[in-house]
Amino acid sequence: MASKKEKSLGRGIDALFAENGVDAGEETVVDLTLADIRPNPYQPRQKFDTKGLNDLAASIEKTGVFQPIIVRQPDKQIQRYEILAGERRFRASKIAGKSTIPGIIREVTEEQMMEIAVLENLQREDLTPLEEAEAYDTLMTKLTLTQAQVSERLGKSRPYIANYLRLLGLPKAVKDMLQRNELSMGQARTLLSLKDKTKLVALAKRAVSEGMTVRAVEAEVNKLNGAAKKLAKKPAKKKSPFLRSTENQLQERFGTQVSINEGNKDHQGHIEIEYLSNDDLNRILDLLNIQSD
């Protein structure tokens, strides 16, 4: 029986291989020279746990590699291979001083290779939020996919994908904090609601140094946003519970700040959707099924 995690990833790795006519029962395990292998160029994971690698290397040094890695050979005339699955075993084998590693050679397309890299790591659930966001962005950019198509292929909801992609609009300093796990996904998402973006990095640093919870960050963001509103000439009209609820639903749908402003007798009101960059605007247009030029 498939686990919930496997079911949540759309077709899954096995399905990708099956599309290419791969029968695992007919495959042969061969010894591959480590020097002839390189990591998957589309590998979204940027950090590997050093202690975990060293522990695995110690195990490999004593008992060897039991599960072969999976590679592809881009050019049949050249004895070079790219890893599809098993980069930790590859890295640990090098640390253990091994010269070869058992592997299975599969024929897959460039497109499948990208999907496999994302799927394998999502199944392990050890990507940082930023790495996961960059993985989705790579699929969209390299394969010219929309958010809806990525959502369908990976079995994730469109709002889920959109919320991760928004992280790419954060300033580099904040991205670094997120990558180092100093900031959580919840804190980063809350920071994106800050209207005055010039204060975003400073608030992120405060969140880290003071150990602020997501609720504390949210409170500070609301405080700063409230201070910004006071600068407006006209006081904001109190919104009905219906409008506040609708705003919250739209914010969850688009993964960004949304404001619904009631009009007067002459105007029916308007909806404001905030975006952080051109890429973020294209993300929102994609959710609205609007093609940008």
Image: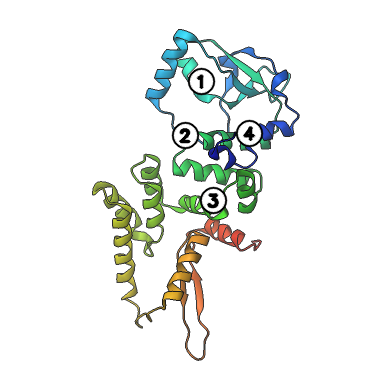
- Marks 1/4: CA–CA distance: 18 Å
Residue kind at label 4, given as amino acid type = Ile
**Which of the labelled discs sits on residue 271, or is there none?**
none
Label 1 vs 4, first from the N-terminus:
4
Label 3 sits on residue: 161
* Dot 1 crowding, Cα within 10 Å, few <14, some 14–19, many 20+: many
Secondary element type, mark 2: loop
Label 2 sits on residue: 46
Q: Residue furthest right?
A: 21
Position of residue 34 measured from the top left corner of the image (x, y, whole percent) = 56, 15
**Which of the labelled discs sits on residue 89, or is there none?**
1
* Dot 4 crowding, Cα within 10 Å, few <14, some 14–19, many 20+: many
Residue kind at label 1, given as amino acid type = Arg
Q: Are marks 1 and 4 in contact (CB under 8 Å)?
A: no
* Dot 3 crowding, Cα within 10 Å, few <14, some 14–19, many 20+: many
Residue kind at label 3, given as amino acid type = Ile
The nearer-to-camera label among 1 and 2 is: 1
Label 1 vs 3, first from the N-terminus:
1
The nearer-to-camera label among 2 and 4 is: 4
* Dot 2 crowding, Cα within 10 Å, few <14, some 14–19, many 20+: few
- Marks 1/3: CA–CA distance: 29 Å
Q: Residue at x 51, y 78 (%)?
A: 270
Label 4 sits on residue: 13
